[in-house]
Amino acid sequence: MRSKECSNKEYLNLVDEIKKHDALYFEKHQPLISDYEYDLLVKQCEEIEKLHPEWVSASSPTQTVREKPTKGFYQVAHSVPMLSLANSYSEEEIRDFIKRVHKILPKDDMEYSAELKMDGIAVSLRYEKGKFVRALTRGNGKIGDDITKNIATISSLPKEINAKNLPDILELRAEVFMLKKVFSELNEQKEEAGQDVWANPRNAAAGSLKLLDTEEVKRRSLSIMVYGLAEGIKEIPTQEGVQKFLKEKKFPTFSKGHFAVCSSAEDLLKFANSIEEKREDLPFEIDGIVIKVNTIRDWEKLGATGKSPRWAIAYKYAPLQAKTKIHDITLQVGRTGVLTPVAELDPVFLAGSTISRATLHNEDEIQRKDIRKGDHVIIEKGGDVIPKVVSVDFTKREKSSKPFVMPDHCPVCSSTVVKKEGEVAVRCSNTMCAAKNERRLMFFASKPAMNIDNLGEKVMKKLIDHGLVKSMSDIYRLTEKDIASLEGFKEKSVQNLLSSIETSKKRSLARFILALGVPFVGTNTAELIAEYAKDVKNLQKLTEDELILIDGVGDKVAHSFVEYFSNENHLHEIEQMLELGVKPKSSKLVQVEGHSFSGKSFVLTGSLEEYSRSDAAALIKERGGKVSSSVTKKTDFVVAGAEPGSKYDKAVTLKVKILTEGEFIKML
C-alpha cells in the first residue's frame, strides 16, 4: 500500500494493525514483528497523515505514547512529561534533523551529544534530599506505573547520594535492561520449565519490571543505565555536563567511548558507525544511538511535538537480519527432555558468522508464526546469540507446504512425549533417554559448568558413542588408553585432555552445583546456594525452608533442589565423583559448640539491618539451630526486623517468643 494511493479505510486498518502490535509488544511482551518492521509501519502512517491531515485518528501512533498502565500498579503523574524519541534509519534523516535545528536556532557553533540507545525500558527516577523515593515507567508520557519496589532490587542503582549542594528534588531519566548473558540463562530456564521464551532482552526486562513479586524481579538480575536529568539542577549547561555529574554521583552511566560531543553530521555518523562495529561485542543490546542538542537551555527554545522533542532524535541501526530458506525442521532433545524444534537453514552469513541452524523454541511459537519446512524466512541474531526466525515470506510458500506437527514419540528413544498442563514444552517421558543423558554430560563439561578444556561436544559424543562415558563420574575414570583409542587423538592431545579433567576436580562448589544440572538452578542461583552450604557434603541436608530463606532462591528452585538431592541415583553419582578425587572448592562451615541456639527452631520475618536473612539463617545454623519458613507451636523464636509480616502476627497468637534484632545479636 503506497501512501499516495491509500484510502481512508486502509489508513484506519493500518492504525488498527499498529495498535495490535502495540498490545503484543507493550502488554504481552511477545512481538510478532521486528522493531524495524514496526517502525516502517509507523513511518507509513506518518506519510499518509502528511498527505491527509484531516484523517488523523486520536489513536494513531503519531499522536500518543503507546505504553498502557498495568493492573496491580499505582499510576502516578510525571512531574516532567516523558516523551518518546522520533526514529531515523538513514544519514539523510540525520542531516534533515540538523537542518531543522539550525532553522530554529541558526548558530555556527551548535554542538550535539551522542550516546548509546539502550534497547530497554525508559524509566523516571526521583530522589528527595539525596534519597531514592520513586521510580515510574514512561506510561503514556504523562502518567506512569509506580515500579519503585522493583527498581530498588537493582543493586547498581544508588539508593542514597550525597545531597550536598543538591536541590531537595532530583528527577533523572534512565533505561532498565537485561544483560545478554542473563537473558540467555533465564530463557534456558524457561524452556526447561516448559514456558514460552522471551523474544529478546528488551521484552524480558519489560516483563520483569511489571511483576508484582519483587523477589522474582530480584532474581531476574536487571541492570540500569542513567542518562538524563529531567528536574532539579539548572546550573548544568550541557548534556555532557550531565554525564559528568552522573559519574560523580556514582550512577551507572555511559562508559568512555560510549558518549561523544560532535559538531557536524559527519562527526555524528562517524561515532554511530564506530559503535555499530562494536555492537556485537557489547554485553547488552543497543539498537542505535541517541543524538541531542548538547546545550540544555536550547531544548526549551526548540520545543516538542505532541509526543517527541525537537531537540533529540534516535538514529537506529538496520536490524541484524538475513534471508534464507528452511530445508528441514528437526528436533533436539535437551538435558531435561524438552523437545526443541530447530530450523535447518540454507547457510547464510549474518553478523560475522555463517548460520545454518536457528531455534524455533516450541510448537506454540511455530504455530504463532506459521513456520513450515520449505519456507523462505528472515532470521535475526539477537540478544540470546542463537539465531531465530523472525518472519516468513508467505508470497514464496509452496502450495504443497504442510503445517509442522510435533511428534507423539521421542525422535531418539521412541518413548511417548508428554505435555503438562500450563506448559508449552513437549518432553520425552523416558528418564533414561540417551539424548537427555548426552546433553547432560555435554553441559557438565561445558565452560559455565566444570569447564573441562578439550572436552567439547564433538569429543564428548565420541566418548559416549564408544561406550567410554555413560555418566558424569565416568569422565573421571578415563585412562590414557581409553582416550588414545579414539580416532584423531595423539599423545599430546590425550595428555591435554587428561590434564584438563584433573584440573576440573578442583572447580568451585558453585560450578559443581551448576554442572549437576538441577532443574531451574542457573549460575547465579548455584552461587547463592554454594555460599550458603559452604561444603558439598551439606547440599543433601538442605531443606526447602532453608533454601527459601536465601535471598534470590524461590519456592520452585527450592523444591527442585531438594527433589534432586532426594534421588538415590543422584547421590550415588556425586559420591562416586568425590571418591574419584573431585573436591569442589569451598569454605568449611564453622560449628559453634554448646551454643544456646542448639536444637532451637527459628523463623525470620521483616528486614534486618545488620544481616541479610540468608546470613542470619547461616549464623543460626552454625550455632546448631534450625530455620523454618513458617511459625508453628514448635517454633522457639521469631526474629522480627523492620516491617514484619503475618509471621509476626501468628507468633503473637501462638505466644511464641519474639526477638528484636538487638536481642538476637546479643544471643549470638
Image: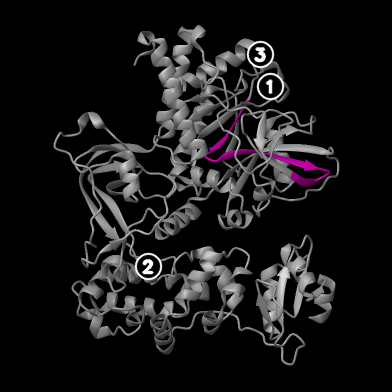
Residue identified by numbered label 3: 105
> Which dot marks residue 463?
none
Name which of mark 1 and mark 3 comes first in the sequence.
Answer: 3
Q: Is residue 115 magenta?
A: yes
The segment highlighted magenta reads 112-133
Q: What amino acid type is highlighted by mark number 2?
A: Phe
Instruction: Identify the element where label 3 is drawn.
Output: loop
Would you place residue 168 above or below residue 508 in this image? above
Task: Pick the quarter of the image with the N terminus.
Answer: top left
Residue lying at 61% horizontally and 56% vertically, measured from the top left? 218
Residue identified by numbered label 1: 299
Residue identified by numbered label 2: 443
Q: CA distance from mark 1 to mark 3?
A: 10 Å
Q: What amino acid type is highlighted by mark number 1?
A: Trp
Which quadrant of the figure has residue 210?
Answer: top right
216 left or right, relative to 128: left
